[in-house]
């Protein structure tokens, strides 16, 4: 069964602490402050924005979605615990996994920890290929399909930085992906220096970024989720660290699939109005 794990266990801290911009309704602000950002219901809609991602995944060929949520997930269950509705209206089977917070912490321990917990709760995935994505980005069905159809067991969408329709200051914060001659990932470069940008370009002269949508084989990535160390500043066990360990310590390749398209994003309340405009384009 073609499976997509959607990571939705984060605390949505930046969304809740941010200020709203124009064209964001009071109801949308209240929803952003009260629940996970992927559960915001936009003005004129009756269901959460997460539906848009799930429907794109179903159109691409995904058959099963695993929602990896926090322990208190009643809001997710309210929307996605009806198996008949999920199959008929969204086109997929939906299962749940829980990211529990380790003792001594007051928030989740990062995306590598999230994926590790999902695989331990659904151990069949340790022996299978599956996709992983964020919950707050709207990936197009063509990108999801490319990951499903690639022969590589481990891959990611390597987006052309120039195709992302964000403010320049936001794009400048994205980590760059250095690719090898066959588009294999060599390095993830955080906070890249402007003077060195030319050295990060791929064979086509393009700057590539990851928007956190991947394909993995469970037996390849799982050991590196378990051994993933904390980021020294953010104090979280992060998926990019685990996958780079998989590459450098395990000698397992992660194939980059070049794409040039925008990926609508919900990080702060300012993004809600932009996201709504992007959704209108998707509908049309």
Image: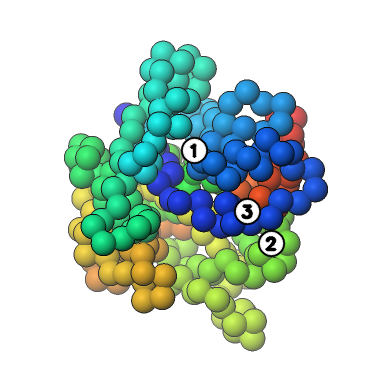
Q: Is residue 55 visible?
A: yes
Indicate the quadrant where residue 56 lies.
Answer: top right
Q: Which residue corresponds to mark 3?
A: 268
Residue at image location 52% in from the left, 17% down from the top? 89
Q: Quadrant of residue 280?
A: top right
- The residue tagged with tag 1: helix, strand or loop? helix
Q: Is residue 173 above or below residue 8?
A: below
Q: Residue at x 37, y 56 (%)?
A: 107
The image shows residue 192, relative to residue 202, as above or below, that is below
Q: Give residue 25's position: percent from left, percent from top.
A: 74, 38
Q: Position of residue 81 (x, y in %)?
A: 39, 23
Q: Is residue 252 left or right of residue 29?
A: left
Of labels 2 and 1, earlier in sequence is 1
Q: Residue at x 72, y 66 (%)?
A: 168
Instruction: Answer whether labels 2 and 1 touch (C-beta < 8 Å).
Output: no
- Give how far apart the Cα atoms at labels 1 and 3 are: 28 Å
Mark 1 or mark 3, earlier in chain: 1
Question: Which residue position is annotated with label 2?
Answer: 162
């Amino acid at each position: 069964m073609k499976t997509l794990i959607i990571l939705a266990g984060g605390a949505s801290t930046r969304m809740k602490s941010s200020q709203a911009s124009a064209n964001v309704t009071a109801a949308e602000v209240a929803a952003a402050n009260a629940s996970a950002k992927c559960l915001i219901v936009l003005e004129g809609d009756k269901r959460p924005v997460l539906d848009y991602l799930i429907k794109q995944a179903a159109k691409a060929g995904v058959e099963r979605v695993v929602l990896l949520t926090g322990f208190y997930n009643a809001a997710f269950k309210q929307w996605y615990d009806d198996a008949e509705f999920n199959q008929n209206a969204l086109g997929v089977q939906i299962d749940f996994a829980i990211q529990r917070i380790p003792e001594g912490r007051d928030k989740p321990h990062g995306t590598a920890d999230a994926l590790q917990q999902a695989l331990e709760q659904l151990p069949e995935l340790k022996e299978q290929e599956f996709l992983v994505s964020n919950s707050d980005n709207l990936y197009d069905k063509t990108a999801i399909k490319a990951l499903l159809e690639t022969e590589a067991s481990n891959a990611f969408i390597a987006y052309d930085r120039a195709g992302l329709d964000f403010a320049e200051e936001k794009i400048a914060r994205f980590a760059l992906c250095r690719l090898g001659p066959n588009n294999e990932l060599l390095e993830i470069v955080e906070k890249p220096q402007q003077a060195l940008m030319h050295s990060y370009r791929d064979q086509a002269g393009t700057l590539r970024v990851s928007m956190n949508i991947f394909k993995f084989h469970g037996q390849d990535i799982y050991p590196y989720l378990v051994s993933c160390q904390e980021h020294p500043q953010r104090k979280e066990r992060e998926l990019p660290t685990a996958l780079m360990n998989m590459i450098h310590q395990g000698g397992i390749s992660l194939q980059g699939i070049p794409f040039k398209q925008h990926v609508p994003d919900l990080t702060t309340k300012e993004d809600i109005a932009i996201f709504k405009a992007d959704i209108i384009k998707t509908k049309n």
